[in-house]
Amino acid sequence: MNCSMRRPACGIHGHGVQFARLNSVRKATNQLAFPLTPAPFARALTERKYEDPTPVQLAVLEAKAEGRDLVVSAQTGSGKTVAYGLAITATLLGEAERFSPEASPVALIVAPTRELAMQVERELEWLYHYTGARILSCVGGMDPKRERRRLSDGAHIIVGTPGRLRDHLERGVLNITDLKAVVLDEADEMLDLGFREDLEFILEATPAERRTLLFSATMPKTIANLAKRYQRNALRIEASGGERAHADIEYRAIRVAPNEVEHAVVNVLRFVEAQSTIVFCNTRDHVRHLHATLLERGFAAVYLSGELSQGERNHALQALRDGRARVCVATDVAARGIDLPNLGLVIHADLPNDAEILQHRSGRTGRAGKKGVSVVLIPLSRRRKAEQMLSAAKVKPQWSGPPSADDIRKLDQQRMLQDPLLTEISSEEELEMARSVLAMRAPEEIAAALVRVYRARLPAAEDVFDPGPGRDFREAKPARRGAHSSEPRNFTWFRLDIGRKNNADPKWLLPMICRRGKVVKADIGAIRITDNETRFEIANAVVERFTIACLVADDEDVKIELLKGGHEASKSPRNFEHKPKFKPRHGAEKPRYEDRKPHGDADRPKFEGAGKPRAEGDGPDFKEKKAAWKKKKR
């Protein structure tokens, strides 16, 4: 598109002066409030109880931004939908307060995913409610014929995904000749998902005089090139400060044993009270398994993954919005763009792959000024990666073990006293029945029955271990297993009742020992496998926890017990024969290097005739010797 042919974008007319004047007053009085907006939008904001604007909303409404193309850095959850919804109002309406009855598209909002597009549609519907605007979403996975019929009826604002919008444009169904504004929401994500060609096609098809607003969480080179090519004199707005993005999110890092991640999820859900929660997993299989586990425990849960149809996804999300479900288990891809009301808790059941994914997941909560909690479950074997990721995300979490069953029971006692079951005013009929029950039963029995009724409504807490902080990854690495040392070894010997006859192999023994004993690989020392049993070392620092954990029955039916004299055995590794890894070639035992005596000239063996010139014919010629040696070797 030839940028030089574009005409100046339409301005904000009289509103711009009012915005600037009121902004200066707000700054002078150090007040945070929405700048003066037209009556329909002010009414909608008041009904939604929007009082203090977010930084991105203030930035796009400043006088210097009026009528200009914008490139805005804004994290998810920063209120950017309302921001660009307000920013384009004067561009679309001018000085009018309502749209004309002729519904011709004047604004196009492009979003990366179906969920985000439908969320934007809902946000703009209430924001533009009193303007008579007709808003329509066009997204993949929905019936395209139905969308074409609705487009033929007319709409003022179109919200859609790149692929579906391009399809409607190519078929000539979507008429954008009167378009005044285009918004690219989460542009970096659209490029990551491979929508570059679709975006370029859409932008090339739009009128040259349109106003273009580009919103992106990050600003890579590809976004800068896109802005340079399709925008003119764009104002760059940075509204995603490092600490600001996490100001409303409380991060907690919870240490978990490798085999107790799902139990930890159950206890966190019971410990942290939230109206709705998202639990993130890295794979579809883990999503399905964890969802089944939560249903079995009594949680009202739904799940989202890429294998679901659009109808199934909509049904799951509606259950969360209605309150019929309180937990959503999802993959990263399925949860893109989801905005759930009253989402107070995010749990990372699987560690994210990088800091950006961590921020994206956590950004589902703590949105638009509301507080939220982000819990990262960290097996000790992945602590180093977790610490690096949290540092890269510029967050400082509170470290702890998983909530214990005792902690949850204490909280249940406090919560029960505040439950509506006890706080609501009783009717006369209920009081009469209560007096009858008191006449027949002791107060303690009635209270105990009430406790049972209350607990029956709640999923049972799990018994979990706190694996402790573990070893600092910056410490020196332990000596190689089986290596001899003059210093005492801080290990204790244990035994398994399986050996070579049972195909014992370290490849599956190590994970099994870690799982059964709630330890990590670094806590295991030497391993000795014999025909009928396996002996292995456990670091003394975790011996007590390891012993207690091994007392719990296991489906594998493998018996682990402390080896008699295990502590004494650990002090001297020579109690068990240590076979060298490499043997001398001919079986002869060579003396150690320190036992060999250096040979001086005086100590060299003297041979008869040594040092004398050999007479001709005394022995075979050197060439003959070499030829004979080569022949023998062949």
Image (cartoon, rainbow, N blue to C red):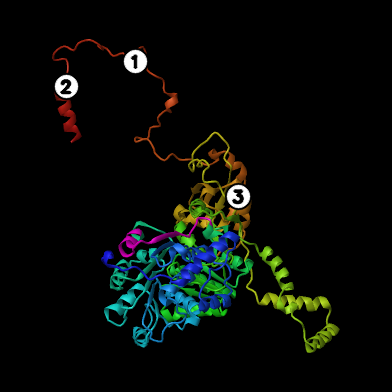
Mark closer to the chain start, 3 or 1: 3
- Residue under circle 2? 622
Front of the two marks 3 and 1: 3
- Residue under circle 3? 542
The answer to whether mark 2 and mark 3 are in CB contact below 8 A is no
Number of the label disc, if any, that sits on residue 268: none
Label 1, secondary structure: give it: loop
- Return the x and y of residue 238 as percentages of the image width and height: 45, 58
Amino acid on which the number 3 mark rests in the picture: Val
Examine the structure image and report whether residue 88 is included in the region drawn in magenta.
Answer: no
Badge 2 crowding class, 10 Å Cα cut-off, few under 14, some 14 to 19, many 20 or more, is few
Label 3, secondary structure: give it: helix
Q: Quadrant of the N terminus?
A: bottom left
Q: Picture quarter containing residue 190?
A: bottom left
The answer to whether mark 1 and mark 2 are in CB contact below 8 A is no
Mark closer to the chain start, 2 or 3: 3
Q: Picture quarter containing residue 411?
A: bottom right
* Label 2 to label 3: alpha-carbon separation: 68 Å
Amino acid on which the number 2 mark rests in the picture: Phe
Front of the two marks 2 and 3: 3
- Residue under circle 1? 604
